[in-house]
Amino acid sequence: MGSWVIYMAIAWLIILAMMFWSIGKLLEAEKQGQGS
Amino acid sequence: MEQQRDQWATKIGLILAMAGNAVGLGNFVRFPTQVAQHGGGAFMVPYFLALFLLGIPIMWVEWVAGRYGGKYGHGTLGPSYYLMARESLKPRSALVMGVISGMVAFAGVTLLNSYYLHLIGWSAAYTWFSITGAYYGKNTGQFFSNYLSNHAEVFLFWGITIVTIAIAVGRGVSKGIEKWVKVMMPLLYIFAIIMVGYVFVLGSPINPNWSTIDGFAFIWTPNWAYLKAHFATVMLAAAGQIFFTLSLGMGIIQNYASYLGPNDDVALSGIATVSLNEFAEVILGGSLAIPLATAYAPKIVPPDVLAQGKNAALAWIGQKFGLGFAYTSLPNVFVSMGQIGRFFGALWFLLLWFAGWTSAIAMYNYLVALFEEDLNIKRSIGTWLVLLIYFILGLPVIYIGLDKYVTPLDNWISFQLTLLALLDIIVAVYLFKPSNFWEELHKGAYIRVPTVYKWITLIIAPIFLLIPLVGTFKGFVSGGIPPTVGAVIIIMFIIGAIETYFAIKKKYGEEIARNEVLIKL
């Protein structure tokens, strides 16, 4: 295993974090009826 | 002069539709092809830069532009961008910007879908081939080539695809898309996650020197030497892939966002769409076709190329089969499962077919909206008119083929999507005025966008877009595009320009004639 594993892990983590954060936030906002 | 249009029933329904539109063959078919063609880890460096410096800001720009246009009854780019440009320009100059933007969007949507619909047709065909076990015991590369040379078969699966899309579009936006996407989208994600797990443990199925893990190393080892040697080309490919996969630079995000209410969030929705798609692309799409192509390369690639190593073998598959890359590698994994693989193969390709199908609906819908809203052509007639356009444009894909038509057209599409992204920033940010853009972005927003993104959108993104555009333009005009492809591109640009001109003139003709704003917003 080379350093590529680290690059892959970082990239995957960033994407997963972004996805869970944005969907979670969206559902939360939807529930509270914010925005419009 | 705000106008009431149909709006999305729920926020999550819209997000799923947007994600369904973004998640498609771009992730599982085009992404691995681009990675293989552009040096693996060399591609991933600009790809990630493009994601954060172009993908996210342009997504916001297009959502804002779409919602803004929708407020005034426009779901297409020409009239929306005319209105936005009018904030800084006199009506006649704004008309020019509107026509240029609408023209590029029209050409993009028609040209891209002309071969994208074929990729969907290939997925339909491979669903059938999985059921019948047609590729079992065969060289999957040779099998794919044989399939493409069987024109009647290609025609049949492509025909089924475009007719079913036309029927779905004819039924209208919310009804036609929302309910289907809600069922099929999660299924695709779940199945892809299971497949990725299988690929990780598959190891070296036919030769101990060629494993799926080597494929991951190819993608994730930065290849600086390759990037340096092919800088502008790899940059364009990376930016083009980001736009392709996020459905940016085509006018269709604006079309979807035009169905939003004037105070619906776009800031968080934009990020949610991007991240859902990137999950499907990088984590799922990046873990299937390339690792599998690496493990099964000894079966597909000639011995002399194999002897040059893994990078050369993957580049060879990418060049030889182009967008067929995934279709030559994925079937092997189902073969490795034995007879039950026929069921899983059929399910996989059917889901892939559906993913492409929903994305194609978005593009199809854009053109129908264009005929309906811009030219007052009834939706039912517009639907069949679009079918006719796609039928004509799809024929060269079958009869001229992959090397001479699809691959050069696909390369051009990267250029054109990047060009429209630049126009997005010029019109929907600079001419619309950056302060207006920023204010619109935060109207009804669930999040506060960091100010750094204002500067990324205003300064860094345009530079990032200009570098590959300037760097590759010469290559395109000096023989990079075969004459047939060039002729089709020019024809689509001309039709797009004429259509957009009349669309804008129809509503704003008087003020354009007098060159002063009469219709106040």
Image (cartoon, coloured by chain):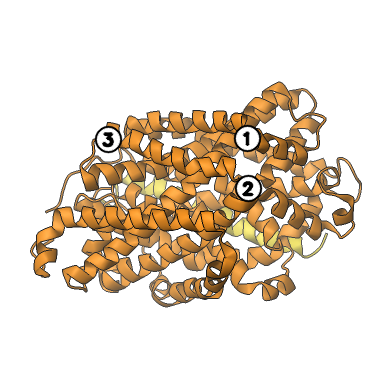
Return the chain for callout 2: B
Q: Nearer the viewer, residue B213 or B461?
A: B461
Q: Earlier in the sequence, mark 3 or mark 2?
A: 3
Comparing marks 3 and 2, which lies closer to the viewer?
2
The amino acid pointed to by label 1 is Phe
Q: Is residue B41 visible?
A: yes
Q: Are marks 1 and 2 in contact (CB under 8 Å)?
A: no
Residue B425 marker: none
Residue behind mark 1: B191
Q: Is residue B305 left or right of residue B279?
A: right
Could you confirm whether marks 3 and 1 are on the same chain?
yes
- Residue A8 rendering spot, x and y as whole percentages: 69, 59
* Colour-to-chain, orange: B
The image shows residue B68, relative to residue B331, as above or below, that is: below
The amino acid pointed to by label 2 is Leu
Q: Is residue B453 left or right of residue B201?
A: left
Circle 3 SS class: helix
Residue drawn at x 54%, y 73% as measured from the top left: B474
Residue B177: name its quadrant.
top left
- Residue B45 rendering spot, x and y as whole percentages: 63, 67
The image shows residue B314, relative to residue B192, as above or below, that is: below
Q: Nearer the viewer, residue B293 or B493?
A: B493
Q: Nearer the viewer, residue A5 or B383?
A: B383
Q: Is residue B374 left or right of residue B511?
A: right
Comparing marks 1 and 2, which lies closer to the viewer?
2
Dot 2, how many residues are within 10 Å of its Cα: few (below 14), some (14-19), or many (20+)?
Answer: many
Q: Is residue B63 visible?
A: no
Residue behind mark 3: B379
* Colour-to-chain, yellow: A
Residue behind mark 2: B402
The amino acid pointed to by label 3 is Arg
